[in-house]
Image: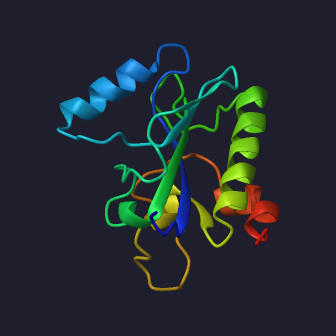
Amino acid sequence: MRSIQYIIVHCTAGSQQTTTVEKLKSHWRGLGWHAPGYHYVVFPSGHTERLAEDDTICNGVKGYNAASLHVAYVGGIDRNGKPIDNRTEAQKAALYFLLEQLKSRYPAATLAGHRDFSPDLDGNGEISEDEFIKYCPCFDVKNEYAGLQRCK
């Protein structure tokens, strides 16, 4: 069993209407990845699909994958290709439920968004929007799930 230190939330950075598991897998194969980018993906309907077992190392955040679980929601980009939190109410509920389950399984794990692993370029101890390498998942995971964060 792996030691899970992080549960990292992502967006797929694709259309909510056209993203399928097969399209995600095809994209990752095109990158030469043998493992998926996420362990779980949450669709606009709230349907959650497991793409890899928790013991599998996925390709979510370079340098952190060995100690992380990766959860994504389908979406995160508007029709002009700009980052946006466009989760449906069903996605928000399903994502909360999934994160609650994962935190109960891995109580010491820290919940974070992909963007929280950007470098602190100005060295002030905080990663601000102008320092994000990616906006993913297009919302503040630490703030939104602060109540789950304290569940240990």
Seen at 53% across and 56% down, the residue is: 8
Residue 80 image offset from top left, x and y in percent = 47, 25
Q: How many marks?
A: 0
Q: Is residue 130 above or below residue 98?
A: below
Residue 5 on image: x %, y %:
53, 70
In the shown orientation, is residue 43 left or right of residue 127? right
**In the current view of this chain or complex, which residue is farthest to the right?**
147
Q: Nearer the viewer, residue 137 or 7?
A: 7
Left or right: residue 89 versus residue 73 is: right
The residue under the point 82% across, 63% down is 147
Q: Can you name the residue that lies furthest to the top here?
A: 18
- Furthest residue toward bottom: 124
Q: List x then y, in percent, for residue 133.
A: 39, 57
Tell me: residue 7, above or below residue 13. Answer: below
**Residue 2, percent from left and from top:** 45, 65
Question: Can residue 129 be seen in the rendering of this structure?
Answer: no
Q: Is residue 114 visible?
A: yes
**What residue sits 48% from the left and 14% below the top?**
18
Q: Nearer the viewer, residue 79 or 90?
A: 90
| Residue 29 occupies quadrant | top left
Question: Relative to residue 125, is residue 152 drawn left or right?
Answer: right
Q: How is the image coloured?
A: rainbow
Q: Is residue 140 above or below residue 92?
A: below
